[in-house]
Amino acid sequence: MAERKHDQRLHDRKFVRTFFTSPTAVEGEEDSAKMLRSASGLRGMQAPDVWVPDNEDATAPSMRDEGARNIIEVVAENGEEFPGEIHPRIVWFREDPETRHQGFEHMLEIADPENGAISHIDGFVIPEVGDIDDWKKADEFLTIVENEHDLEEGSIAMSVIIESGAAELAMEELRTEMGKPTNNLERLFMLVIGEVDYTKDMRAITPTGNLPSWPEVRHNTSRGASAAGLISVDGPYDDIRDVEGYRERMTDNQAKGLLGIWSLTPGQVVEANRSPLPPEESRWRIDAGGRRVDLEESEGVQVYDGSRVSLEESGGSYTLRVGGDEEEFDEDELREELLKMVEYIPSMDDIVDSMEEFEAAKEAGRGAIAMERSATLRIDGVEIDLSNDRMWDEATYQAAMTPISLLQDVYEHRPDQHEELAEMYSEDVVSRAVDVGGA
C-alpha cells in the first residue's frame, strides 16, 4: 500500500473558519443546559463551522458531570439539524492522570450509542496536551472508546489545543508519528491555539498584564497543520466589542494560512465566517505613509481624500508629499512611484473571472497570460492613469484557488449559508465559483 502523504487532508471539511465554544452547564439556572440549547439553534452565518460544547474551562468543575449529560441530551435532540460539526471539549491535563481519567469517562459516556448523541458528534477536543506521547494517550483513549462501543476505529476525530511549549514542539513530530500501526493519530483534525494557558506555561510577562501577541505560535501552528494535513485555528479574541481588532487579527492570520479562529459570541462567528471569503466588491487602496486607506470611486476615478498624501503638478513636474517626505517626479517616475503605493483588492467576481480566463488560455495551449489592472487615480485634483500587468501561470492559478476552494467547501457543507452567499455575491457568481477549477 502506498504511503500517505501527510499534507493530505483526511476529513470531510477542508476548512474551518469558526470554532465556537458554549458552556455545557450553567450553575444556578433552572435549565443548566440553556447555553447549549441556544447554540444548537444557530443557523446561517451565525452558526459556526465547528461548535464546541465546552466541558472544560467554560464549565465549573463541580458541574462537569452534569455538563456531560447535558451534551448528550441536547446533541441527541438537536444535533441532527445543527449545520456545522460538533466537537465537545473534555477535560485533560498532561501532568494529571486523574483529570485524564475523568475526560476518558466523559468521552465514554458521551460516545455510548445508546445515549443517542454520538451519531451527531464528529470528534472531541483535547486541551492541555503535552509532548507527542501525551497526544498518543488521548488517541489511545479514543480508540478504547470506539472499541468499547463497537464504533469504527479512527472514526472519532481528535483536535488538540496548543497550550504549552511541549505541545508546540510536538507538532513537529506529527509527520513522523501519523500513520504508524501503533496509533490512530490520523484521526487528528484541528490544531487550536490556547494562548492564555500558553502564556502561563511560558511564564511570560508584559508591562500591562495583557497577553503577548505570540505571532511565532500562530505561524508554527499553521505550519504544523499544513505539514500534517490538519486545520489550524487561532485562539480567542476576548475583547468582544473590538470588532475592528478582531478583523485585523484575522487578516494577519490569513496571511499565515491560519484561516480559522475561536469565536466567543454569535457576532464574532458572523465576522469570522465572512472574513476569509473574498470581498463582495473590488476596491483600490493606497499606502498613505504606513497606513492603508481605501480609495473612493467617483465616476470611474479612484479618489484619495486625506491629508497624509498630497500631489501638485506644475509644468509637467509633480510634487508628491507622503507624511513628512517630499519628492519631485516627472510623469513616468510619478506613475512608477504610485504603482508602488496602490494595491488592488479583487472581489469574488474578479477572482472567478481571472481563473476562468486562465483556464480558457490553458485549454488553448498557453501556459501563462498577462492580467491587466488599470485605474485613474486622483489626488488633490491631479489625475494619473495607472496600469500594470500581472503574469498568471499554473502556480499563480493554484494560489488563487485557495479562497475559491474555501467557498466551495462552505457551499458543500453549509447549505444553510447558500442564501446569504447569494445575497453577498449574486447567485451567478456563486454558481461560477462553485464550478471553477473542475470542482
Image (cartoon, rainbow, N blue to C red):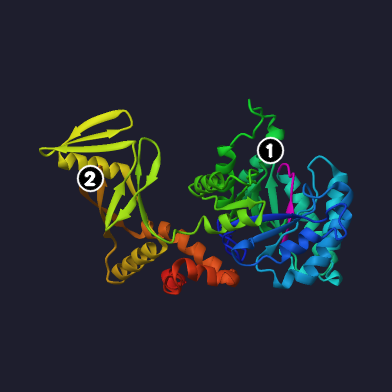
> Viewer-proximal residue, 317 or 68?
317
Judging by the rendered image, the residue that carries numbered circle 1 is: 198
Q: What residue is rendered at 34% in x and 44% in y?
A: 286
Judging by the rendered image, the residue that carries numbered circle 2 is: 381
Q: What residue is rendered at 31% in x and 42% in y?
A: 341
- Classify the position of the N terminus by image quarter: bottom right
Q: Is residue 359 left or right of residue 193?
A: left
Q: Is residue 151 visible?
A: no
Residue 89: x and y, percent? 76, 54
Query: Looking at the image, which residue sits at the far top?
Result: 207
Let me know if residue 130 is in the magenta part.
yes
Is disc 2 placed on a helix, strand or loop? loop
Q: Quadrant of residue 348?
A: bottom left
Span highlighted in magenta in the image: 123-131
Tag 1: residue type? Tyr
Q: Earlier in the sequence, mark 2 or mark 1?
A: 1
Is disc 1 placed on a helix, strand or loop? helix
Q: Is residue 437 visible?
A: yes
Q: Nearer the viewer, mark 2 or mark 1?
A: 2
Residue 75: x and y, percent? 78, 67
Within 10 angstroms of label 1, few (less than 14), some, or many (20 or more) residues? many
Residue 234: mark: none
Within 10 angstroms of label 2, few (less than 14), some, or many (20 or more) residues? some
Compared with 290, 343 (above or below) is: below
Tag 2: residue type? Gly
Q: Are marks 2 and 1 in contact (CB under 8 Å)?
A: no
Residue 95: x and y, percent? 81, 39
Let me know if residue 139 is in the magenta part.
no
Q: What residue is rendered at 67% in x and 30% in y?
A: 209
